[in-house]
């Protein structure tokens, strides 16, 4: 039943691929005539948009097929009706969801930056974070830095090397 929706999307994707081929073959004509280029861009955009709409309808139709057991065509029509009737709710939920995702990214980034700031501001409180959590294999071996006389980790990112994991720490 659901293979019809996938077939329709596949046909649209095939037409888009053909249009990409035609676009590449007519680059010289498009450079000479901006109207041809404009129509090619319009056709490509319309096909892209049609594919996105069909995928969205298919997703909702597949849900109706799974939940209600309707045929694909009836489920697709019902999905379109549900989308149209609940357009404002869908927009509101998507807007709130996008905002919460953005807010989560900001909070996580800020928390990591704040934690790093406190780790560097008070190094005595965090003497060796890799050792404190019980991961002795992940403790980098120090090596002297000839330029500054400092001690640097054995690896660039502090991750264990193959020798450390296989043969153990040489400390």
Image (tube, rainbow, N blue to C red):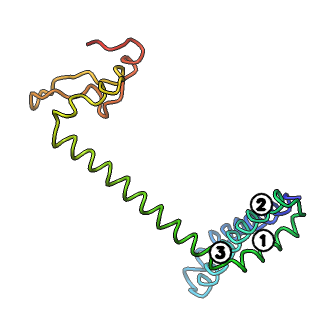
Residue 161 lies, with reference to residue 18, above or below; the image says: above
Q: Is residue 97 left or right of residue 124?
A: right
Location of the C terminus (image quadrant): top left
Identify the residue at horizontal 77%, vertical 60% (top origin).
63
Say which label, 3 or 1, has the lower sequence index: 3
Residue 158 lies, with reference to residue 108, above or below; the image says: above
Q: Is residue 157 left or right of residue 20?
A: left
Provide residue 58's location: percent of width, then percent of height: 76, 65
Say which label, 3 or 2, has the lower sequence index: 3
Q: Which residue is mark 1?
A: 79
Q: Nearer the viewer, residue 58 or 107?
A: 107
Q: Is residue 51 left or right of residue 142?
A: right
Crowd around label 2: few <14 · some 14–19 · many ≥20 (10 Å):
some
Residue 85 lies, with reference to residue 115, above or below; the image says: below
Identify the residue at horizontal 73%, vertical 64% (top origin).
13
Provide residue 135's location: percent of width, then percent of height: 36, 23
Whether residues under marks 3 and 1 lie with C-beta atoms below 8 angstroms apart, the answer is no
State how far apart marks 3 and 2 are (Cα).
Answer: 29 Å
From the viewer's perspective, is the residue at label 3 or at label 1 nearer?
A: 1
State how far apart marks 2 and 1 are (Cα).
Answer: 9 Å
State how far apart marks 3 and 1 are (Cα).
Answer: 26 Å
Q: Which residue is mark 3?
A: 44
Q: Nearer the viewer, residue 54 or 68?
A: 68
Q: Which residue is mark 2?
A: 63
Label number found at residue 158: none
Element type at mark 1: helix
Q: Nearer the viewer, residue 49 or 14?
A: 49
């Amino acid at each position: 039943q659901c293979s019809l929706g996938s077939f329709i999307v596949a046909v649209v994707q095939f037409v888009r691929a053909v249009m990409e081929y035609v676009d590449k073959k007519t680059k010289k004509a498009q450079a000479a005539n901006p109207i041809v280029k404009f129509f090619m861009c319009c056709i490509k955009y319309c096909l892209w948009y049609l594919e996105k709409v069909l995928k969205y309808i298919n997703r909702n139709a597949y849900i109706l097929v799974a939940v209600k057991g309707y045929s694909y065509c009836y489920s697709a029509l019902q999905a379109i009706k549900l989308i149209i009737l609940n357009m404002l709710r869908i927009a509101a939920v998507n807007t709130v969801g996008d905002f919460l995702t953005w807010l989560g990214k900001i909070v996580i980034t800020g928390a990591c930056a704040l934690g790093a700031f406190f780790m560097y501001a008070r190094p005595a409180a965090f003497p060796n974070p890799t050792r404190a959590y019980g991961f002795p294999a992940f403790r980098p071996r120090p090596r002297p830095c000839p330029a500054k006389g400092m001690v640097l980790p054995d690896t660039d990112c502090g991750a264990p090397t193959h020798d450390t994991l296989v043969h153990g720490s040489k400390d």
